[in-house]
Amino acid sequence: MKKLTWWFRIVGAFYLLLTLMNVYFLFLADGSQMLADTLPAPMNTEPLAVRAFMDAWLVFVLEFGVLGAMALVASRSPLQNKIMAWVIIWAELFRGVLADGIWIMRGYDVGSYIPFIVIHLIIIVTGILFMRQAKAETAVSPQLAMGD
């Protein structure tokens, strides 16, 4: 169960780090050029398209912040909060792997999205693996599930 606890903590901290970095680029630094560089032509040279992408990106960033904070809360009782692990895993699959793959097919920068697809897959696979291990541990020792 310790692996699942640490999975929640690491994923939660990673999400909060991404949130802070993106908030910095969206509001404090001129992140428009950074985001424009990831857009396919001709959108990357159209200021209105870049602005629309930044606005949509903000929703994604705020979601990361909420999921990160809740993952840290869930780490206190990982088995009782396994639904949170499934929320993260399914979000990683759809909002992560699938969405990034679609963006790549639509001409978005492959170099920007392939590394994140790998990270999404690592989070998915380790989350499923650690949940199965925690469940198996509690089947052997039910006291673990109760926190004893």
Image (spheres, rainbow, N blue to C red):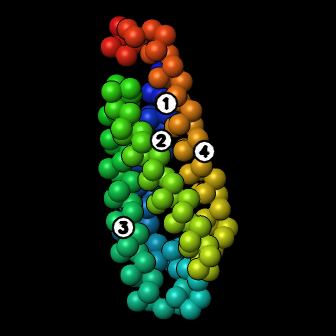
Q: Residues within 10 Å of mark 2 (few under 14, many from 20)?
A: many
Q: Nearer the viewer, mark 2 or mark 1?
A: 1
Q: Residues within 10 Å of mark 4 (few under 14, many from 20)?
A: few
Q: Which residue in the structure is indicated by mark 1?
A: 131
Q: Earlier in the sequence, mark 4 or mark 2?
A: 2
Q: Which residue in the structure is indicated by mark 3?
A: 58
Residue 106: x %, y % from top left: 59, 80
Q: Earlier in the sequence, mark 1 or mark 4?
A: 4
Is residue 137 rendered to the left or right of residue 105? left
Residue 136: x %, y % from top left: 51, 19
Quadrant of the image occupied by residue 44: bottom right
> CA gap, disc 3 to disc 1?
30 Å
Circles 1 and 4, Cβ within 8 Å, touching? The answer is: no
> CA gap, disc 2 to disc 1?
14 Å
Q: Nearer the viewer, mark 4 or mark 2?
A: 4
Element carrying mark 3: helix
As drawn, the label of residue 122 is: 4
Q: Which residue in the structure is indicated by mark 2?
A: 11
Q: Is residue 105 above or below residue 137?
A: below
> CA gap, disc 1 to disc 4?
14 Å
Q: Amino acid at mark 2?
A: Val
Residue 96 in view, yes or no: yes
Q: Amino acid at mark 3?
A: Leu
